[in-house]
Amino acid sequence: MTETLHLPTARYTWGGDEFLFVEFDEAMNLTANYLATTVAQGLTGLELEGVVDVCPANASLLVRFDPDVLAPEELKRRAQELESQARTSTQHRAQTRIIEVPVWYQDPYTAEVVQRFREGYHQDPSGTDLDYAAHVNGLSDAAEFIRRHHGSPWLVSMVGFVAGLPFMYQLVPRERQLEVPKYLSPRTDTPPLTVGHGGCFACIYSVRGAGGYQMFGIAAAPIYDPAQELPDFRDFLILFRPGDLVKFRPVDEAEYRSIQEQVEAGTWRFKQAPVTFDVEAALADPDTYNRTLLEALDGAEN
Amino acid sequence: MALRIEQPGLLTTVQDQGRFGYYNVGIPQGGAMDQESAQAANKLVGNSAEEAVLECTYMGPSFTVDAPTTIAVAGADVPLLVNGQERPPWTRIELAEGDAVKFGVIRGGARFYLAIRGGIDVPQVLGSRSTYAIGRLGGLHGRKLEAGDVVPVGEPTGLLPSIEEIPASHRPASGGPLELRIVWGLYDHLLTDEGRRRLVEEEWKLTPVADRMGLRFEGPGVEWIEREQPFGAGSDPSNIVDAGYAVGSIQIPGGTQPIVLHRDAVSGGGYAMVGTVISADMDLLARATPGTVTRFRAVDLEEAHAARRERAQRLEELWAL
């Protein structure tokens, strides 16, 4: 493994007069993400007056605050305390859940948009995004890339960009991470629920709009429900939280249509199960650990 | 009480002072881009600062009112016509049932604000009435206004102020060259010294690619330090591992055109931010038109806080009028 639980001290910097930014590592890794999520939870728990938004990201943390209420140096001191607690804690575990996300890979909706944005947008205008992704990862074909894409679970390492969009990091050793450059120039259109990939991150576009990630398929059910009509969204209009685990499950057109019907009828629910995510175990023996995570889904209902 | 929209204008949306606390799930603060002008309009009609107004971009809407009411327009310089007769902006205007309001061609600035006594009465969503269009959230049906819309207006809660006009001393100026104060930080260490120098010493010009999400500038470009990119960041030296974006922060994809993120910007992404426009200058930026010659001036946090206090005091004086 190329990852360890030990990272150099975080870098603290300011985004103008209203934002504190903490970078735990320049590179993506599970430990930096764990620190970002843990310090964010700690800060939220303190309920400091003057803290407006606490936004954990992949390997960093952004805090919006009102400097008229909370002195910048005081906020920084609190964050540093939480950082040092998170580093010296002996257990790096989080209570979370694993969610199964059905995906129609190589669907016609993303294929149409892929075709519209080739010349001037894409590294290889002659092929599809999947062909290109397979090629740059040294895999035999698109089918092999798709197998690798849904073969191991992903960690929701950040939620953002637009409402409810999850960034996901695959729980495999670094040498097996799928890495794909973003489009040369961002598209002006992306179908809602597109499963995308940029750098080492997968994402699901929650709404229609601009995007620069390569497009591989389409998720069958909404992950953002502003009208809160589906049961999974009764408490909140956004499905994913940082720390959630995701297992993609490939579906064919018939099953995609059947899920769409359940969505229309207001009966669709994501299959999910509670799990404890243990960073040490995930780093020590990822393949075995992933199997135990996936077993949690076996008995789950949707 | 409601406004019946005949023509919606170019981009007319319901906005208040913003939606906070949901940035961690990608929902931007939104709200009026030029908050000071929105507040001035609210002041004149006896609303609170937080009431929702219509933000009109370049081309205003035309509408009729279905009951007697009171309106005010503030912000960009635009002819305001009531039943075809021009009426002054920055003043309180009484309308009778059936009166028709429309706007002429904008003469300067980018956005103006229409406040109506009682406020735009769309439901609050996550604590705000602001429109988040790509998320189909807030505002009127989560989108910009369209012809045929009926925009509900609330019951007045406050008394009308004694002043009927915002004095010239309290009207923000628009037009002319722009100076935006920035605080270095976030990822400015990824720029070369020459890149940093160019950002704050050379002239930049606002391009037409400027909306509620961000405003793009053209100019001499900047230079990034050549380095091995960290794992997961992407191949361009302007790329980082996707992170949260500070509102007002400046990113320079590929090193060519700086983009300043505004109140509807995406909440995060993979472009390095190299500094942040201070909160006191965000309204100034909202008023700028394409072609505006712009300088970014670096200040320290102390100066940013002093500017913040000055702005707060200016707003206090406005509400004390």
Image (tube, coloured by chain):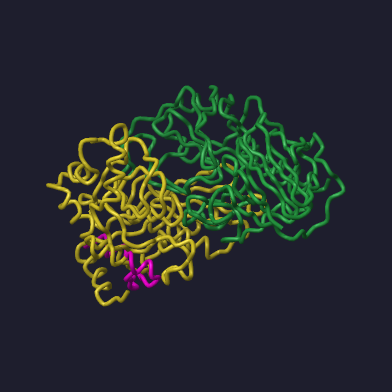
In the displayed structure, A254 sits above or below A110; it is below
The image position of residue B138, as x and y in percent, is: 56, 56
Residue extending farthest left: A140
Residue B89 in view, yes or no = yes
Q: Residue at x 47, y 70 (%)?
A: A234
Specify the quadrant that holds the C terminus of chain B: top right
Q: Residue at x 62, y 50 (%)?
A: B15
Viewer-closest of A160 and B209 = B209
The mark tally for this picture is 0
Task: Report if residue A80 is visible in the image.
Answer: no
Q: Which residues are magenta?
A: A260-286
> Could you say where residue A251 lies in the image, as x and y percent from the top left?
23, 62
What is the letter of the yellow chain?
A
Which of B317 and B145 lies nearest the eye of the viewer?
A: B145
The quarter of the picture where residue B152 lies is bottom right
Quadrant of the image containing the N terminus of chain B: bottom right
**B251 sits to left or right of B169:** left
> Residue B253 placed where, x, y %?
41, 34
- The spot of residue B264 in percent (x, y) is 53, 46
Q: Is residue A27 magenta?
A: no
Q: Quadrant of residue A5?
A: bottom left
Left or right of residue B152, residue A99 in this image:
left
Q: Which chain does green denote in the image?
A: B
Vertical comparison of B103 with A216: above or below: above
User: Which residue is rendered at x = 31% and y = 32% of the image?
Assistant: A120
Task: Say which residue appears at 33% left-offset and 67% top-offset.
Answer: A261
Task: Return the residue nearer the eye: B200 or A261.
Answer: A261
A282 part of magenta stretch: yes
